[in-house]
Amino acid sequence: MGLLDKIYNAIHPTSPVPVAGGPNIDFMEVREGGKVIRYERGNHREAYYGNAYRACALAKARPLASLPVHVYERKGGVRVEAGGYTAKDLSRLLRTRWNPFMTAQEGFRWMDMTKDAKGNAFARVEWSGPRIVAIWPLSGEPEVRMTPAGGVVFKYAGDKFTPAGNYLSREIVWVKSPILDDDGLMGVSLAQLAARELGLSIDIEEFYSKLITNGNHFPGWLETDQKMDEQGMELLKKQLDDGSGIVNAGKLRVFDRGMRYHSTGYTMVDMSLVEQEKWILQQTCRTLSVPPQEVFDLSNATYSNIEQGALNFANKTLVPECAEIERAFSCVLWDAGIENAYVQFDLNGLLRGNYKDRMEGYRIGLYSGFYCPNDIRAKEDMPPYEGGELFLRPTAYATVDPASGEAVYPTSEAQQGTGGSGEDPGGGALNAIHEDMRARIAERLRDGGDSEKFRDFATRVLTPYANACTMARIKYDIKADIEEIVANEGH
C-alpha cells in the first residue's frame, strides 16, 4: 500500500478522478465528455520475437544501461555531487542495484525496452521514512488519476513485488515513448507502430518458418496417369529418400510408373528472403531511430562514415533517451521537495570521438585556460599529478583600446608596477643579465659618483635590456631603474 492510502481518505472525502491508464496492461481508460472510454492495449511482448525489432531495441538499451549515472546539485553556480541523504540513496541505487533482484544496468535496459514496446514504463520508488531503499519495475500500467486538489495519483492493481494501492508522484517513475497519444498523456508503442507501418508481422522469421513447415517451399511436383496404390507410394518415398543428401545432390533421378516432374515458379529464390529481411530491418531502424550499422547491417557502411555514424547515434538517439530517463528520476526528487538536485548520465564516453580529435580538443581547452591538465587526465581516467591543477593563461593575445586604437597586451602584476626594476617574473636568464648590468653600474657609481657622464654610461649599459623587455612585452623604465640604483647606493 502506498503512502497516499494512509492519509488520503482522511483528507479528501471524494474519490480521485480517473484520467488514463489501467490496473492491467491490456487497456486504458480516458474520460471524455463525462464518459469513460475504454481502449484496448496489447501486451506487445511478442514484438521481441521479431529479430529486427529486438536488434534495434537492444542497440539502444545496452549502451544506455552501461553509462555512469550521478545525482548532482548546484551550489553557487557550480555542479557538485548531491549531499542530501535522499539524493545519495537514489544515486547509490542508480549506480549499483535497483533492488535485491535487479542490477541498475538491468533496470535501465528494462525501462528503455519496455517504454518502446508498450509505450510507457513505470517503476515504483520504495521509501522507508525519508530514505529511498529500492526501485521496483511495475509489470502493469497504473491508472493516472487527478485529485480534487490538483495532485497526481497512480492507482495500481498490484503485482509480485508491488502491492495494490494508490501511490504519490514521488513514488512512481514514469517514462514514455517519444510518440504520445492524441491527449499527449500516454506514450504509444513503437513496436505496434512499426508492425502497422510494415503491414506485416514484425516476426518475418516466423512467417517463413510456417511457410517452410507446410511444404510450400517445394520447387516442384511429380505427376502420373497411373493409379498409385499404397505399395506404389511406399516405393516412391523410398526412391526419394535414397536420392536425398549431399552425396546424391546433382544426380539424375528416374521414377517409374510414368511419373513426370513439374517445377513451380514459387521458390525460396523468388521470395527474396534476404531482401525482405533487409527492408524490414531498415524500416524498424527508422522507427526506433537506430542507424542500420548499429544492428550490423553494413551494406552501406564505409570506413569514413561508420565512426561519424556512431557519434550521430549517440547525439540524436541516446542523448534524448537519457534525457527522458533523467527527468523521470529527477521528478522523484523534485516532488519530494529536493528541487536543486537532478539525475544525469555521463555521456563523455559516447561523445568523445576518435583519439586524434579528442586530443586536439583537449589541447585547445588547455591553452585557452578552459581546462587544467588534471581536468583532462580525469576525463581519460588517469590519476592527477601535483601542479596539474594550475590553469594556463594566454599571454600572446591583445585587446584594442577603443579610445586610442592601440593594442594593449596583458601583463602580470609584477610587470604592472611603477618601479623600474623590470624583473622577469619567471626569474630566467633575462633577469640574471639585468642583475649583472645593475652590478656594473653600481660599481661605476661608487668609483666616480653621480654625474651626467655616469648617467650616460648607465643608459648605454641598460639599453640592450630595455630592448629585450620591449620584445618580451615587459614594462620597463630605464630612468626609473637608474634612480633606484642611485638611491640604493646612497643608503
Image (cartoon, grey):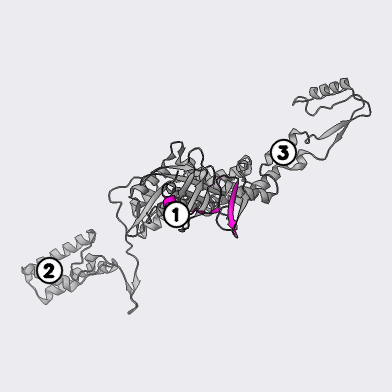
Q: Disc 3 vs disc 1: which is toward the camera?
A: 1
Q: CA distance from mark 1 to mark 2?
A: 90 Å
Three-letter amino acid code at the position of disc 1: His
Instruction: Determine the residue positioned at 12% across, 73% down.
Output: 454
**Residue at the disc numbered 1:** 12
Three-letter amino acid code at the position of disc 2: Ile
Q: Earlier in the sequence, mark 1 or mark 2?
A: 1
Q: Where is residue 382 drawn, in percent x and y?
A: 36, 45
Three-letter amino acid code at the position of disc 3: Tyr
Which quarter of the rendering shows the N terminus? top left
Q: Disc 1 vs disc 2: which is toward the camera?
A: 1
Write the start and end of the magenta stretch as one range.
6-32
Q: Where is residue 463 drawn, in percent x and y?
A: 22, 70
**Residue at the disc numbered 3:** 208
Instruction: Determine the residue positioned at 46% across, 48% down.
Output: 167
Q: Secondary structure at mark 2?
A: helix
Q: Secondary structure at mark 1?
A: loop
Q: Where is residue 407 drawn, in percent x and y?
A: 33, 73
